[in-house]
Image: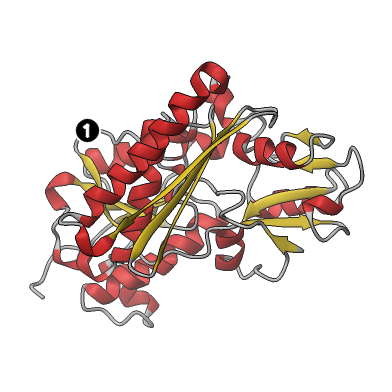
Amino acid sequence: MPMQPPVRIGARGSKLSLAQSGMMQRRIAAALGADPTNAAEVERVAPLVVITTTGDRVQDRRLLEIGGKGLFTKEIEEALLDGRIDCAVHSMKDVPAAMVDGLCIAAIPEREDPRDAFLSRGPERLEDLTDGAVLGTASLRRQAQSLFRRPDLKVEMLRGNVDTRLAKLAAGEADAILLAYAGLKRLGLGHLPTSLIDAVQCPPAPGQGALAIQTRIADRDAAWLAAVRHEPTMLTVAAERGAMWALEASCRTAIGAHAWLEGGSLNLVVEALTPDGARRFRHSGSAELSQLADPEGSARDLGLSLGQAVKDEAGDALVL
């Protein structure tokens, strides 16, 4: 591979973001010809640039109250646009449906387990919690899905990084919490959940468990990006984000989408719920991959179709 300037990687400063970005830093460095086990060489060819976002600074309110999930990406995207970094590593579930002009998702590596994890101070499952138990979450989707299954629960807003939420659980501020299993695994905490939530029965956030490598559009065909792309993951995430786009999903909309490949087919289930969990709207479908001339585009179209079906059925019920 020809010599090129270092690829500067923008990332948030949370422990989870640094763990995820460190994984990708080593992958990118290897694609650039560096030894991924040599920390100094990795930092030389693919340095990490830590950027604090508004979403990191404001921890006492739900994202929907301060501007939505884009607050985890805004400052990083500004750094991309003005040339301070060359790519960014995001949790895909934090990336808004609409992309900022001039930027793109250039690669998605292989996905980690997309399921939600249930953690408690005793009960093994959500169904085992006592009547009126306190469930801690800042996610409107997790709130709605949990109340659909257990309308008696008391849901309390719980933001903060993984360590903060675990500490609040241990301190008794909640009887149980829900976290992304992928994040726990990447932090070496995959042993903590008491159970995992079925992704078909309760679809996670679109793109949950996947990482997004964002670049300027002009750089999307850089040779090193090919080494970190995972085509099956790009297909499933395209389907889920298609549904998100159709539903205009944000932190103000309780939606879940889960896509998976099985037997040559791309399968997708999409659901949206009212915030109180009283009503759920759900559609599913599939597409045969062998018949798709443009698999990624067709995956997105499947998501758009199912998301629109959910939206048409729900009408104004989803408006917060």
Compared to residue 281, the image places residue 6 above or below, namely below
Compared to residue 9, the image places residue 283 above or below, namely above
Left or right: where does residue 181 sit relative to residue 124?
Answer: left
Residue at 36% across, 34% down: 245
Quadrant housing the N terminus? bottom left
Q: Secondary structure at mark 1?
A: loop
Would you say residue 207 is visible in this rendering?
Answer: yes
Residue located beneath label 1 in the image? 101
Depth check: 168 or 250 in front?
250
Find residue 63 and report its horizontal and vertical position in percent.
56, 31
- Which class describes the residues within 10 Å of circle 1: few (<14), some (14-19), or many (20+)? few
Find residue 182 and report its horizontal and vertical position in percent.
55, 61
Would you say residue 75 is visible in this rendering?
Answer: no
Residue at 49% across, 29% down: 68
Count of marks placed on residues:
1
Residue furthest out toward the top: 316
Depth check: 98 or 146 in front?
146
Left or right: where does residue 174 sit relative to residue 184?
Answer: right
**Quarter of the image where one finds residue 266:** bottom left
Find residue 66 and report its horizontal and vertical position in percent.
54, 24
Find residue 264 and report its horizontal and vertical position in percent.
33, 68
Q: Amino acid at mark 1?
A: Asp
Residue at 35% across, 62% down: 265
Compared to residue 39, the image places residue 243 above or below, namely above
Residue at 69% across, 55% down: 163
**Quarter of the image where one finds residue 227:** bottom left
Q: How is the image coloured?
A: secondary structure
Quadrant housing the C terminus? top right
Residue furthest out toward the left: 2
Compared to residue 119, the image places residue 25 above or below, namely below
